[in-house]
């Protein structure tokens, strides 16, 4: 049975280096459903109507057998498996990182339906790209055909975000390298990641994250061509 495991690793997580990297394998989608939304890569850009299979993303790290449930942090790229990712703290997402961590840590373990999984993904994207609770405007917003129940569920998640939150040290960001450029993910820190932090797994070269959003061609949490 797949489970979303949030480990309390205490001081171990403090030792994680953002230069650490590992190979990520896509193992299919968990609870997920199609999500219709509009996204603006940058202010002033024309809006892009998109749809994605949004929700739980099943991944495996390196040769470890453990399955992890992740959520997407990047609507501009599709999954390209396998890919290299660097391990970074949620603070690497900027001032909205703790809010994203709150959504993931609080509601990730409670997801028991496709609708809730997609709603949580929508709330994470809304927080990342707009930082508010308005799912009908901004850089990221849901289209009317996304479904009223999903919209209401995502709104409930957003309205619950506290003004201040300290993320668990067991939640981390997997930042994709460039070759191939895949999705950035938020994941629970697993034993393979702990070993990686201490250099017990082979390290791969970290690639820098592209800064120009217009150069990003793929979008959504789509499964790769297998």
Image (tube, grey):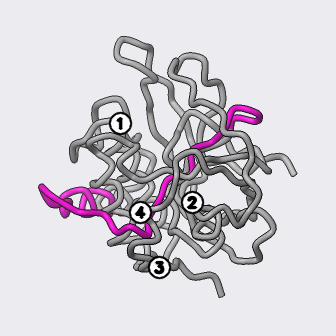
**Gap in angstroms between the C-alphas marked 2 and 4:** 35 Å
| Disc 2 packing (10 Å; few <14; some 14–19; many ≥20) | many
Judging by the rendered image, the residue that carries numbered circle 3 is 7
Q: Where does label 4 land, which residue?
A: 14
Along the viewing direction, whichever of 214 and 7 lies nearer the viewer: 7
Q: Is residue 158 magenta?
A: yes
Which is nearer the N-term, disc 2 or disc 1? 2
The residue stretch that appears in magenta: 153-181
The image quarter containing residue 47 is top left
Q: Nearer the viewer, residue 119 or 181?
A: 181
Return the mark for residue 172.
none
Residue situated furthest left in the rendering: 163
- Identify residue for label 1: 129
Under tag 3, what secondary structure?
loop
Q: Earlier in the sequence, mark 4 or mark 1?
A: 4
Residue at left 40%, top 43%? Answer: 92
């Amino acid at each position: 049975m797949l489970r979303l495991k949030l480990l309390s690793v205490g001081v171990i997580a403090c030792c994680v280096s953002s230069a650490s990297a590992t190979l990520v394998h896509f193992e299919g989608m968990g609870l997920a459903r199609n999500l219709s939304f509009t996204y603006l890569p940058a202010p002033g850009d024309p809006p892009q109507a998109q749809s994605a299979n949004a929700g739980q993303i099943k991944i495996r790290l390196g040769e470890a057998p453990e399955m992890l449930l992740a959520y997407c942090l990047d609507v501009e790229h599709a999954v390209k498996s396998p890919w290299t990712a660097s391990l970074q703290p949620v603070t690497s997402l900027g001032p909205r990182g703790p809010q994203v961590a709150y959504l993931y840590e609080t509601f990730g373990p409670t997801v028991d339906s496709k609708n809730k999984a997609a709603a949580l993904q929508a709330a994470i994207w809304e927080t990342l790209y707009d930082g508010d609770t308005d799912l009908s405007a901004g850089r990221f917003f849901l289209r009317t055909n996304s479904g009223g129940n999903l919209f209401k569920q995502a709104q409930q998640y957003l309205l619950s975000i506290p003004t201040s939150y300290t993320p668990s040290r067991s939640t981390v960001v997997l930042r994709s390298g460039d070759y191939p450029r895949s999705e950035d993910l938020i994941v629970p820190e697993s034993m393979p990641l702990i070993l990686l932090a201490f250099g017990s797994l082979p390290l791969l070269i970290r690639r820098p994250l592209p800064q120009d959003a217009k150069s990003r061609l793929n979008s959504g949490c789509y499964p790769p061509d297998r």
